[in-house]
Structure formats: structure tokens, C-alpha cells
Amino acid sequence: MENNTVDIIGAGLAGTEAALQLAQRGIVVRLFEMRPLVQTDVHRSGNAAELVCSNSLKSTKPDSAAGMLKHELSCLGSYLISFANETRVAAGGALAVDRDLFSQLATDALEAHPLITRVNAEVVGLGAEGEVLVANGDGSDAALYAPADAVIVASGPLTSDRLAAYMQKLTGQGHLAFYDAAAPVVMADSLDRSKVFSQSRYEDGGGDYLNAPFGKEEYERFMEELVAADRVIKREFETTDLFQACQPIEEIARRGFDAPRFGPLKPVGLTDPATGRRPWAVVQLRAEDAHGQSFNLVGFQTNLTFSEQKRVFRMIPGLENAEFARYGVMHRNSFIDAPQMLSRTLQLNTEAAHALPVPIFVAGQFGGTEGYCEAIASGLYAALSVSAQLNGESAPMLPDETAFGALIAYATSPETQDYQPMHVNFGIMKPFEKKIRNKRERYAAYASRGDEALQGYVEALHKKGLIG
């Protein structure tokens, strides 16, 4: 009996995880990726699972929503969460990775699997029989292979214009986009260590973060220049649709000079060893690579021009001679209206999609989730859904009590209106019948309840032969 075949569009976090999960289950995978033939404004390589914004996968604390999600991924056998742990760099209670090593491990795993074929081509849509159409160099389209048994669209936030236009036809909705901002990275040896100090919040002595402390007057001068600095000019819809979870630092400052001081520049839990006091404000820097050769400016996503970033960010104490390994950029993030278009299994549930002879699933940020681990989880979950459907089974539903289950329930509920991509958080989780007023106890209870529900889900997957 021949193996089933699944076409996956996009070798980002979701597509890579889905490909490895399907291949593990004996399913042939054709993984389409337009890079390096067609590059984006923010990617640097043609490797799979390349991280283009922060190198942090957020908290590992078990009683946090992000920590719950990582636990769920580990229990479900996620490949990428395993690669993240292998390439981890110091970041306090967060899981941060050496982005190059992480991406290389993912790429190597794909290339080593005999059931996965990577196709370097720009996908522009599907044919009438469900075959993947790719762009030829002469401007025409071509189908490289016979139709697969299912398709997973995991093209990510930087979906190409032609594929986005095709997906618009399938969804019947207008093109939806918001703009995300990436923070700059500076070289470690260009920092003034007499001014920046090593410390994590609420910890004595050294820590995993470098901290650049502001005095009151220094901070106010910096804010004046930050607000007045030249920005990259965008069309009106680009500037009004800035993604709320990743606001550029200059946009936060426009709300008021003190807004950053109570946000990404908050000094709480830190003591400047030079003064013995808490600074007026602090810019934290997190290691970008395993060897600590470069540092990311935490919370400094920006839309400033490169020359203005160099001028203004060098006003930060300790960064007067900073050498920029990467400037901050703003880039397009595309996504579909998930609550109106996706089923609980992540299958595209529109009339045009159902008219095709192959089922279409959507994973990753294009499907309306936000965050690295959320993308990984959606790829894994889509793979489980596809595997079940190809075996004539109905996939068990991920319980609402789990972190990702709560997100899926929220993101695929038709009652969710004015949807913006969401990350896992306790605000969308099912509340307890008896209210727990103490926040720490409530979060711990969420984690305990979620773990119990997860174990039941894993058992259900075992019974259906969907997990080893």
C-alpha cells in the first residue's frame, strides 16, 4: 500500500514541525519553501525554521501560560522544542536560543528524513485538482507534482503577494495584514561595561541580562530624540495596523514620555551597582548567541530608519559606541480571519476550499496564532489532524484546559469578533467555578488542571495510534 502524501507550503516553525511529525508517522511530505530563491526583507538564509524577530521563546515557568505550552509540546514529542533546548542560551527564566544553531538543527532533520522532499519554489496557489502551482522564471505557473492527499498552508506572516491573493480567493475575505517590528542587535564588545551591568530582576549579583541604566535627565533627552526621529514611511494602512503585541518603542513613547518607563524600560527589581539605587529607567539586553557575542535590545522593536537607530540608540548609556549586528525592521504579517474560517482541527472551512478535491489545513501565524511556540504547536496539531483524517479517524480535540487548547478554542470560535493573532495567555482560559483570588495560586491551579487534561489527551492519541 502506497503511503499518503501531504504538501506543506512553508518551511518556517509550523511547516517544519508539521513535516517532521507527518514523516514520523510514515506519511510522505513535499515541503515547499520559496527561500532562498525568493527572499524576504527580514530573513537572512534559506534554512528552515529561521527566527527573524527575538531569539526568545518566552518563559519556561510551569505556572505561566508560556511555560504550560512548552510542557505540552514536550509531552507531545515536538521536534522543534527539543532543538530549542539543545541550542539554549542564558536568558533567566526564558527559553532563548542561538538562532543559527536552532535553524541548522531543523534544516538537518528535514534533509535527513527519507520521506521529506524539500522543493525550493514560490507557491502561488493550487490547481483545480488540488495540485500545488509554483512560479516559473518566465512568469508562468507550473505544477511540479500530482495532487497530494492533503495540503497544509504554513506560509507564515511574510506570505508572498501571489499566494496571499490566492488565499484571499479561498477565504472570501479581504486581505488582512498587520505589521510586526523586530529589535536591533548590537555586538557585545562594543558595549561600555563600565556603564552596563549584569543582573536579572530581583536577583543579587550577576544575571543573564545586561542592563543599561538611565538617569532622569538622560532618559528625558533620549525620549525627546526617540519621538522626533525619522521613521520608515509606510502607507496609512500599515501604520494604523501595527500589531499590538509588538509595538515599536517609538510608538510606545508617543503615548507619553513615561510610557516606556512603565513598559519595556521599567527599572523594577534592578539595582545599579554604580549608585546602589534603582535607576530611573533601564534598557535590558539579552544574549543573542550561545557565546554572548551579540545582544538583543529587549522590547526595542522599531520602525526608525537605520541611520536614526544608530544615532538615537547610541544615546542609551553604555551604547555610545554600539556596533549594530542587525538594525530593527518592520515587516508585513499576513493572517486569515481564523474564527470565521478554520475548524477546530485547523482545516480551512470555506465554500471555495471545500470545492477542492483535497482538504486544506492552515498552521502557524498565517492561521491566526502569534508567537514562536504557538506556531510550533499549530504545526504539530495540524499534523495530528491530517494524520487522523487520512486514517479515516476523527482527531481527539485538544482540551480547553490546556494552554494551546484554550488558544485554539478562542481562535476558531465564530463568537470571537475583530480577531487579531493571539498568543497563549491565562486571559482566554476557562475560569474555575470557584474563583481563586490569589494570582499565584490561580496560575498554579491552571497549570495543574492543564497537565491533567493533557495526560487525558495523550491517552486518547495513543488509543487512536496517533502518537507513539
Image (cartoon, rainbow, N blue to C red):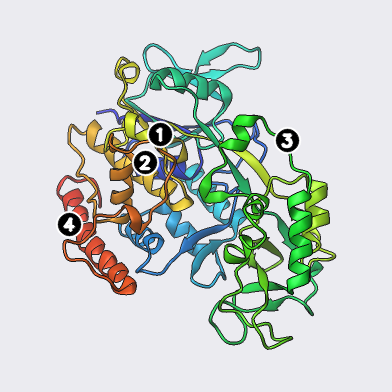
Mark 1 and mark 3 in contact? Answer it, CB < 8 Å.
Answer: no
Total marks in image: 4
Q: Secondary structure at mark 1?
A: strand
Mark 4, Cα crowd under 10 Å, few <14 / some 14-19 / many 20+, is some
- Kindly identify which residue carries mark 3: 233
- Kindly identify which residue carries mark 1: 29
Mark 2 or mark 1: whose residue is earlier in sequence: 2
Task: Work out whether residue 19 or residue 27 is closer to the camera in this orientation and state it.
Answer: 19
What amino acid type is highlighted by mark number 2? Ala
Please indicate whether residue 228 sits to the left or right of residue 284 in the image: right
Mark 2, Cα crowd under 10 Å, few <14 / some 14-19 / many 20+, is some
Mark 3 or mark 4: whose residue is earlier in sequence: 3
Look at the picture and state if 138 lies above or below 76: above
In which quarter of the view is residue 324 placed?
bottom right
What amino acid type is highlighted by mark number 1? Val
Front of the two marks 3 and 2: 3
What amino acid type is highlighted by mark number 4? Gly
- Kindly identify which residue carries mark 2: 23
Q: Position of residue 446 (x, y in %)?
A: 27, 64
